[in-house]
Amino acid sequence: MEKSADTMEKIVALSKRRGFVFQGSEIYGGFVGSYDYGPYGVELANNIKAVWWKSMVQKEKNIVGLDSAVVTHPKVWEASGHVGGFSDPLVECNECHTRSRADHLLEDKDIFADEKMSEEEINKLFDSHRDKLTCPKCGQKDFGEIKALNLLVKSNLGNFSDNWNEDPSYLRGETCQGIYINYKNVLDSARVKIPFGIAQIGKAFRNEIAPRQYIFRKREFEQMEMQMFVSPDSGMEKFEEWKEKRMQYYLDLGFKAENLRWHEHENLVFYAKAAFDIEYNFPFGYKELEGVHARGDYDLTQHQKFSDTSMEYLDQKNNEKYIPHVVETSVGLDRTFLAVMTEFYDEDELGGDTRIVMRFPKKLAPIKVAVFPLLKNKPDLVAKAEEVFSLVAEEMRAEFDDNGNVGKRYRRQDEIGTPHCVTIDFETLGEENSDLKDTVTVRDRDTGEQERVAIADLIEYLK
Ligand code: GAP
């Protein structure tokens, strides 16, 4: 199916109607930049995390996992540079006082603005286009000066000085800092040798002033990050290796190559050696999905300085000491979720009906198999279907549905991307043809074709 401008609306509507994504705090009128994952959403999100973990940890012999704290010593964020510099350029409309991000106002007029531009660059660009830029709320063109808004979310947890709020702690703005501060612990406990990686999945928080594009930019979101610690001379080689691996990951998941592309950062932060983003063709255009960055020794050097703890590595083979360089791969779970919804959303005609079908790869599908008794009011059918449900539910996420006619039940499962539906009918009970006793009908989501399978072979068939 060709994706068009209304694809986004369709995905948002389906996500709410079928319990993938709900607006956060909806009964209180919503809460900007906050979304909740519903019953199928949480299954899909968990599957995305499991696929990432399998690819980054399980299948990599020199990558280990970590789950670090969300709230850390505040010095972590001074060392990382977030307290001083991690900010968004904000302008206020002089007419209605709505605050907007300067780079977004520029983007809305198709003037290229990168969120990684320096403050000076954004200021210059904004000033040179002031006459074109309009307030999204009231349409006026009169703005104040750009102000930098710090993105870190402050917390009053863990205040430890006498000055109370003078010493705030922060909710982490990115998960990788938890990895850097545990690099020594991992080195000393996990018997790893450079090059090795640490992977982590977890929540991150940012005071995004203009969260937008649905779950693309949230204030509370989840990151899946891996930091590879390498020797200074092999940094660029590892970087190229990971660039290739991360693009292949999306292709292996079933994404079309034409929906993915590389974007090279033109304005590198001073410490970075190279930075590329994988962009996905979202319904609102190509946007960053994942970053693959060669960060040099900046992060560990900063933590060494601020914590007074040596971050040096002793390379016993060459009897050399150095601070390792870092190659990072960082992707948002929520952005992957939206990319997956976009990539696999489809509409087609089957048996004369138009249907919505989520063509999720099996490993991502929220429900792997749905089990139906043909009729709800026949206790023998229902009992047998419950037996089959228990059998498959032992092995995979399954759903039991006895509501409405079987055609409608198929449509409901197509919409949530269930690869197989299993129907228990009178033949299963051996009432009409004893040869078919203890067999069921298995229907394929993509082709609509049905096959008769013995219950004894069902698990193997579904797997
Ligand atoms: N450690 C590097 C880092 O955090 P980033 O480009 O700021 O770099 C990495 O974020 C990834 O996290 C992005 O590519 C994106 O997928 C996701 N991400 C960042 N901000 C987000 C937000 N506000 N909402 C959802 N996802 C976000």
Image: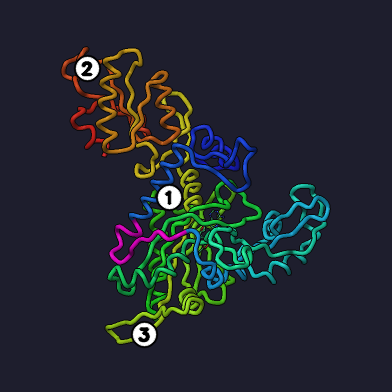
Residue 114 in sight here: no
Q: CA distance from mark 3 to mark 1?
A: 42 Å
Q: Quick check: can you spot residue 445?
A: yes
Q: Is residue 18 above or below residue 301?
A: above
SS at mark 3 in the image: strand
Residue 2: % across, % down:
52, 42
Depth check, mark 3 against mark 1: the one in front is: 3
Q: Is residue 335 above or below residue 2?
A: below
In this rendering, is residue 115 above or below 334?
below
Residue type, label 2 = Leu
Q: CA distance from mark 2 to mark 1?
A: 42 Å
Is ligand 1 within 8 Å of the beta carbon of the residue shown at mark 1?
no
Kindly report which numbered mark, 2 or 1, lies closer to the viewer in this rendering: 2
Residue 255's tag is: 1
Residue 81 position in % (x across, y down): 57, 71
User: Tag on residue 429?
Assistant: 2
Q: Residue at x 39, y 70 (%)?
A: 183
Secondary element at image label 1:
loop
First to last magenta residue range: 55-69
Q: Earlier in the sequence, mark 2 or mark 3?
A: 3
x%, y% of residue 42? 44, 42
Q: How many marks?
A: 3
Instruction: Say which residue label 3 marks.
Output: 321
Q: Are marks 2 and 1 in contact (CB under 8 Å)?
A: no
Which label's residue is closer to the chain start, 3 or 1? 1
Q: CA distance from mark 2 to mark 3?
A: 72 Å
Q: Check disc 3 and give the amino acid type.
A: Lys
Q: Nearer the viewer, mark 2 or mark 3?
A: 3
